[in-house]
Amino acid sequence: MGFPRECTLPTTGCNSRRVISGTICLLMAQIRAIRKRMTAVGTIARITKTMQMIATAKFTAALTRAKNSRPYTNAIRSLVGEVSGAAGEYDSPLFEAQAGAKKELLLVIASDRGLCGAYNGNVFKKALQHIRACRTDDKEIAVETSGKKSVAFFKFQKMTPEAQHVLGDKPSFEDVARIADHYMEDFAEGKWNKISVAYMRFETNARQIPEVIQLLPLAPEANQQEETTGSAANYEFSPSAGEILDDLLPRSVKTALFQMFNDSVVSENIMRMIAMKAATENANDLGKDLRRDYNRARQAQITTELTEIISGAAALE
């Protein structure tokens, strides 16, 4: 014997309302989760936008410094070539490694902070290629680092740097000159037979190239300009050309290293600017997707609530 007809309708309506109420609870939980994600994504977008603006300001300042120092660096290099051509048999301890030197030093210039795209990765990749090439040729090589990220990288590679330099976003010529003086002193004493620098060379806003450049020994440039241009001016030097080169050669090493640091800072900031711009755009796109999902979930909640009201009214009839 079944239940009376008047008893079945309330039971069915009650079960239906339970299902609808459970659906509403799930939708509300989903809406809360989406709202939290929207808030988090919005915060991330504001942070990355701010970092992009800071990187842009730093890039502009660093580019100005790099452009201002480049003519001086080129002029020193050109002047060294002209004086060397008139110096005859001039010799310098910076031209050739000492007989007992058998170990190379590699300075790796990286950043202190991350979030700069592939800047550090490209520099480290180039440095590792150089290190492996030296080891393949059975050459000893030691590493010095500039930037906190390079310290962590070589620690992961189980390599202990000889020294760690931290020059910040605005490397001063005095700090770089002290590093260069130390390198020239060690090279002249025969501690190293070669000193190279791994850094990111800045060409244009869209092109930065990781390179390993030989800093020491210097290549003698005697008679190079006369051979390439076909003519050379005759100068009378006072003091002698050799004495002038004694001052110019260390200065050229310092300016070359300073230019490398400036190029590295410019490359770092433009790559951080590009990376933060891309991150901001991705966060904005994700925010739009979340807003669409939120609207859909809210509409589903409204529809479910209307269904509950209609079901309840039908159950009471």
Image (cartoon, rainbow, N blue to C red):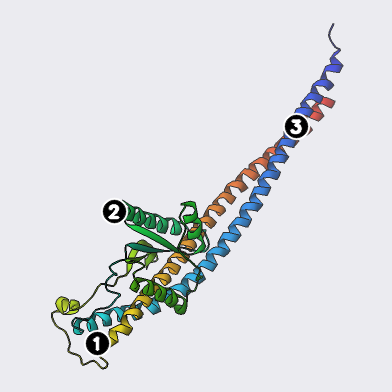
Left or right of 53? Residue 16 is right
- The secondary structure type at the circle numbered 3 is helix
Q: Is residue 210 visible?
A: yes
Please identify, in this view, whether the residue under mark 1 or under mark 2 is nearer the observer.
2
Q: Which of 55 and 42 is in front in this view?
A: 55
Please identify, in this view, whether the residue under mark 3 or under mark 1 is nearer the observer.
1
Identify residue type, mark 2.
Answer: Asp
Q: How crowded is mark 2: few (under 14 residues within 10 Å), some or many (20 or more)?
A: few
**102 versus 218 height, above or below:** above
Give the residue at the far top of this rendering: 1
Q: Give residue 138's position: percent from left, percent from top.
A: 31, 53
The quadrant of the image that shows the C terminus is top right
Q: Name the residue under label 2.
A: 137
**171 versus 48 height, above or below:** below
Q: Earlier in the sequence, mark 3 or mark 2?
A: 3
Q: Mark on residue 22? A: 3
In the rendered structure, are the residues bearing label 1 and label 2 in contact, judged by CB atoms less than 8 Å apart? no
Q: How crowded is mark 3: few (under 14 residues within 10 Å), some or many (20 or more)?
A: few
Identify residue type, mark 1.
Answer: Ala
Q: Give residue 32's position: percent from left, percent from top.
A: 71, 44
Q: Quadrant of residue 131?
A: bottom left
Q: Is residue 198 visible?
A: no
- The secondary structure type at the circle numbered 1 is helix
Whole-Å distance between the Cαs marked 3 and 1? 92 Å
Q: Name the residue under label 1.
A: 241
Q: Which of 165 and 117 is in front in this view?
A: 165
Q: Residues within 10 Å of mark 1 (few under 14, many from 20)?
A: many
Q: Give residue 273's position: percent from left, percent from top.
A: 49, 63
Q: Earlier in the sequence, mark 1 or mark 2?
A: 2
Q: In which quarter of the image is residue 200?
A: bottom left
Q: Quadrant of residue 70?
A: bottom left
- The secondary structure type at the circle numbered 2 is loop
